[in-house]
Image (spheres, helix red, strand yellow):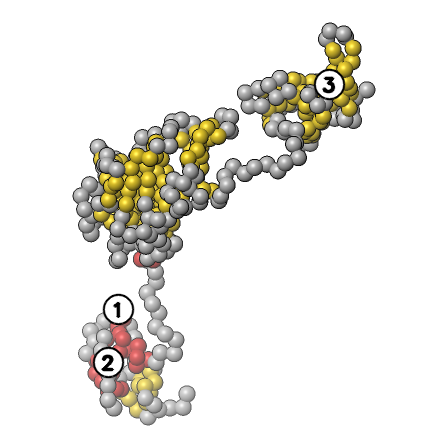
Amino acid sequence: DRQVIIWNPYTKKIMVPLQGHNAALQHVELNESNHQLMSLSVDKVVKVWDIRTYKCIQTFTDKALQYKPEDRITCAAFDAESSSLVLGARGLSLWSLNAKESSGQKAQPTHRARITAFLYNTVFQQVVSADTAGTVAIWCIHTGKLQFEFRHAHGDHKITCMAPDASKRRILTGSDDGTIRLWNFSSGHHLRTYVKRNTQSITGVLSVQEGPNTFIIATTWERKIYVWPDLKKQVVEATYVLEDERNGHMDDITGLVSCSSQVKSSCLLATGGEDGHVILWKIQATRADSRSVKGRLHDAAQRTKSKTRRPAQPPRGEDALTKLERSFGTEFTGDAKASQAVNAQRQAPKGPPSGSQSVRLSSMVTGGAEIVGNTPYSARPG
């Protein structure tokens, strides 16, 4: 009769029939924690019911595959840990049951302002998000619930970027006021502030480690890379700035990443910019010098092609005398151009010509006179 019937176990009478399926039912599952009932019919339709209100709150149909020999789902099971329904036929498919009875109100957004930074902490298995209003929120990855948040991290200024520290137990947040703040990951307690001499907005922040030393690295819109030591002080000033007007970036820096774990011998930083270049920088404990830029990443194949290009061809329309001048590396001037060319040809080494000296004078028109062999005489038509 295509109905789900709920019975009273004490009176053994029908309490309410749940109607909505268009085919015979073959399986039911119960989600007690969310007060939900799942029903599966032979036409591969699954309905989720709220057993408190006896209303259908979700319907989905498995139309992705055509099962053979019978186009039907043969079994189903509910996974309480992931709140999902597993359907089986010739293969298994997982369906998320996230529907709840609507209260008629629009869902509230996760943040009250635009989200500008996101990261995942592998130690605590938590997601951290930050917005332009200065709110930092900590979320549980398993339940999706907000564990705690702290607001106005940089006062009235916006959070522009965020990164974990080297231990992954603290958070670094950068702001448009040019400062970086360090926070306790578990409590949201402010530990210290990293400052520089100007208020240029922080566009990227990173924590890198070189042996026993830990550094805080930040980029700004002024194409500079600021370096702070990780000192246990309330306010830490930048030790030095990485910049190179000749070999550095010529446009805004858009990304940075640490290469310390891949390169054991030294602490390297890779930056990419809107100029299309990826540059490697060396991070050191002392003040930076001209050797901070280690080089640019380039395609070796493209560079080889550029080195093996064919030599430039002489421009079209070049007359024979100009070719001869280029061959001997000299310039014939004055009214005696033709005779100078003849003398140069006579003084040339005997034997077969080689290289650029293979220019012949046997039929060359120069200045209205035709030279045949080594003797000039009056010009002939054509």
Q: Residue furthest right?
A: 1
- Look at label 3 and name its amino acid: Gln
Q: CA distance from mark 1 to mark 3?
A: 93 Å
User: Dot 2, crowdedness within 10 Å: few (<14), some or many (≥20)?
Assistant: few
- The picture quadrant where one finds residue 262 is top left
Q: Are marks 3 and 2 in contact (CB under 8 Å)?
A: no
Which quadrant, please, contains the N terminus? top right
Give the residue type that dot 2 points to.
Glu
Question: Image point 33% across, 35% down: which residue?
Answer: 190
Residue with the mark numbered 3: 26
Residue named by callout 1: 354
Q: Which mark is residue 150?
A: none
Residue at the top extreme of this rendering: 10
Estimate the spatial distance between the alpha carbons at disc 1 and disc 2, rounded to whole Å: 20 Å
What is the x, y in percent for residue 160? 40, 45
- Disc nearest the viewer among 1 and 2: 2
Q: Residue at x 42, y 38 (%)?
A: 151
Q: Circle 3 — which element?
A: strand
| Residue under the image location 30 percent in, 77 percent down | 323
Between disc 1 and disc 3, whose residue precedes?
3
Tell me: 68 left or right of 323: right
Q: Is residue 275 above or below residue 82?
A: below
Placement of the C terminus among the 4 image quadrants: bottom left
| 71 or 347: nearer the viewer | 71
Res. 131 visible in picture: yes
Mark 1 surroundings: few (<14), some (14-19) or many (≥20) residues within 10 A:
few
Q: In x, y percent, where is residue 240? A: 22, 47
